[in-house]
Image: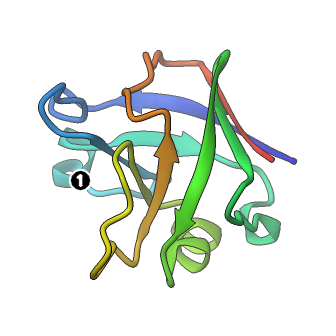
Amino acid sequence: MKKGTIKEIGPQAIDSQERMIIFFGEEATDTLREYSVIQTIPDSQALVVKKEDQITFGDQTYQVQYVGTVANQILQTIQHVTFVFDEVPAEEPLSSAIYLTPTVLPNLEVGMQVTYN
């Protein structure tokens, strides 16, 4: 189990019409910060997310339905991942994404813990 902390939520990061939220580590550019949630994960190099794992945002728990082909690699290196709260498409799911259920966006706050297990 790994825990991260939400450090910042960009003004354009959450859109109720979009069923995805983009996370980046603290080295994200100003442009990326506008559209992202900034997180810190100590020892992120050891983080591996698998199908059927759980990710908890504060006290809101989600089941991992799919992990994109490069999602773990970029999560480990730059703490970037796109969380998608929608069905996994039959063709061409996002390679940088982790698809989660339920398909409702979590309520996020600065300082909130994100638990990967």
State the residue lying farthest toward the right. Answer: 1
Q: Which is nearer the eye, 114 or 16?
A: 16
Image quarter for residue 82? bottom left
Q: In terms of secondary structure, where does tag 1 sit?
A: helix
Q: Is 59 on the left or on the right of 108, as rendered?
A: right
Circle 1: is it few (<14), some (14-19), or many (20+) Cα within 10 Å?
A: some
Residue plotted at (67% across, 63% down): 51
Percent across and percent down for residue 117 are 81, 47
Nearer to the camera, 82 or 31: 82
According to the picture, the residue beneath numbered tag 1 turns out to be 32
Left or right: where 75 falls relative to 97:
right
As displayed, is residue 75 above or below residue 41? below
* x, y percent for residue 39: 53, 42
Measured as percent of width and height from the top left, residue 43 is found at 80, 59
Q: Is residue 83 above or below residue 70?
A: above
When asked about the image quadrant of residue 95, the answer is bottom left
Residue 103 percent across, percent down from the top left: 39, 35
- 24 shown above or below 68: above
- What residue is shown at x 44% (from left), y 23% (from top)? 106
Q: Residue at x 51, y 30 (%)?
A: 7
- Please count the marks in the image: 1
Amino acid residing under circle 1: Leu
**Residue sitting nearer the eye, 73 or 26:** 73
